[in-house]
Image (cartoon, rainbow, N blue to C red):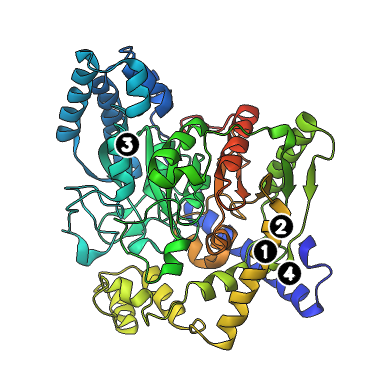
Amino acid sequence: MAEIQNAPLSRVIGGYIFAILQACIRFVFRLIYGQKGESMPPITDPILLESATSLAKKIRNQELSSVQVLESFIRRVKEVNPLLNCVVDERYGQALKEAAEADALIKSGHYTVEELAKQKPFLGVPITTKDCISVKGMLHTAGLYERRHVRATKDADAMALMRKAGAIPFALTNVSEVCMWWESNNTVHGRTRNAYDTNRIVGGSSGGEGCIQSAAASAFGLGSDIGGSIRMPAFFNGIFGHKPSKLTVSNVGQFPAPFSAEQNAFLGLGPMSRFAEDLRPMLKIMAGEKSALLNLDKEVDLTKLKFFYQESDGGGRLISAVDSDLRQAMKRVVQHLNQKFGTQKVERIQLPQFRQSAAIWFANMRDDSGHGFAYQLGNLEKDINTYLELMKWFFGASKHTFIGLTTAIMDSAQCKHGSPKYDHLVSKRNELRAEIQKLLGDNGVLIYPTHPTVAPYHNEPIMRPINFAYTGIVNVLGFPATAVPLGQLGNEGLPLGVQIIANFNEDRLCLAVAEELERAFGGWAKPDVRL
């Protein structure tokens, strides 16, 4: 509660009351769920422990076949999915044919190993994505019951580029309803469970993708992020996830599509993987022609980088205090960087505007289309009657989730586009954006919590709905950010981590720091290891 000690008395009292309430809520959920959930099957196949980059190299060099690799991941999905419910659709038969074709191409000798590495850097490597990013022939529901039979007629731009680079999509993963909540649960596919503790959430909306990666059931995957939907699942599931700089990766093929050009700038499709070394080549492919803006091949000299860190948002209203485990993890990161790159290399800062992250995010998500979340729940065809659907939900007659309906009601109560409050909060965003741009320049990164708590219990986010603000603020600012797992699990046996934020188009700085922290702390930790 250190953030509120210098605040007005009313906010201090409110902060303490909220903290007590949060402690009581956590106590109740612990009583409900008790001990940790079912144990994960151990990872016994060494293929599953390789990065996508390493697998691609071994496939090119014929040390492994693409069919062999794909079969390993299919077996792992069949082993873990009954427990986790992360995979909601598959194309195993077609994927195996494509894997055999990749193997035949390599054996044909039409390309040298060097040519393959340049033209098809992920040839034969299995890939997954979430059920809102289109993959031709696969479900494209976004967790919305009305779309339960919809199948994509073409690949999303980002997936098409990954396919062109040789990757083979083989499975689709679960999301939250219309991808606008941070627990992956819907009335089409049900709820996804965390590999480290099945009583905990996987995050959302790329929660199924975070889960399949953490369970070592996919080599790598694509996610999307408009409020933290890559970074929260990456954090909760102990993997790496990167939200790119605004407008560097095409969002075409994502459902629901943004309502406005500004919302399109907030949304970012990005890479997710257990291994930091996969993010850079994935992003280079996904960005297509715009990859030139990112200078991803330019070496980053970490000794010349400016490091800043902020331990919390400063006490945002109705946002949980940062867990002590996560504060200690942040201190270990700072200590490592200071020891390796020079004493006092990492500067502690406190940006006061972060305390208003939630309000800024909600306001900036408004647009002049006249549509809101109720329109998304209506499949972008009509506004649903949220109050009628909520009444039906209490009688088990609605095809929408409780949180989807309440989110739509909350959304309708937010400030209107063009109102004085809207203009004020957009101005606050612009001020914060300019302040961070000046702070970071072209050689600085900000280390910031990805989330204030470790993965909550199922349904617990309903009691902590605004905690996503730690990631959401970065979306409306437009900066790149990478979620980085820190190896060792916390006191609750769950992953710990931070996010690394850089200036526009300086994604390579985020990724370089992620690689350094992986070397220092170990990155992804196998979920079959119990404390």
Picture quarter with the C terminus: top right
The Cα–Cα distance between marks 1 and 2, rounded to whole angstroms, is 6 Å
Q: Secondary structure at mark 1?
A: helix
Q: Which residue is mark 3?
A: 127
CA distance for labels 4 and 2: 34 Å
- Pointer 3 and pointer 2: residues touching (CB < 8 Å)? no
Residue 398: image x %, image y %?
A: 26, 73
Q: Residue at x 71, y 57 (%)?
A: 438
Callout 2 crowding tier (Cα within 10 Å): few <14, some 14–19, many ≥20? few
Q: Is residue 415 above or below residue 76?
A: below
How far apart are the alpha carbons under marks 3 and 2?
Answer: 38 Å
Residue at screen point 59% across, 59% down? 470
The answer to whether residue 337 is above or below residue 21 is above
Give above or below for 254 relative to 495. Answer: below
The answer to whether marks 1 and 2 mark residues whose Cβ atoms lie closer than 8 Å is: yes
Task: Name the residue that disc number 4 marks.
Answer: 16
- Density class for disc 1 (Cα within 10 Å; few <14, some 14-19, many ≥20) is few
Of pointers 3 and 4, the one earlier in the residue sequence:
4
> The disc labelled 3 sits on which kind of residue?
Ile
Residue 76: x, y in percent?
A: 31, 30
Give me the disc on residue 434. Answer: 1
Marking on residue 438? 2
Mark earlier in primary sequence (3, 2): 3
Provide the secondary structure element on which disc 3 rests: strand
Q: Is residue 284 left or right of residue 448?
A: left
Distance from disc 4 to disc 1, alpha carbons, whole Å, reads 32 Å
Q: Nearer the viewer, mark 4 or mark 1?
A: 1
Q: Residues within 10 Å of mark 3 (few under 14, many from 20)?
A: many
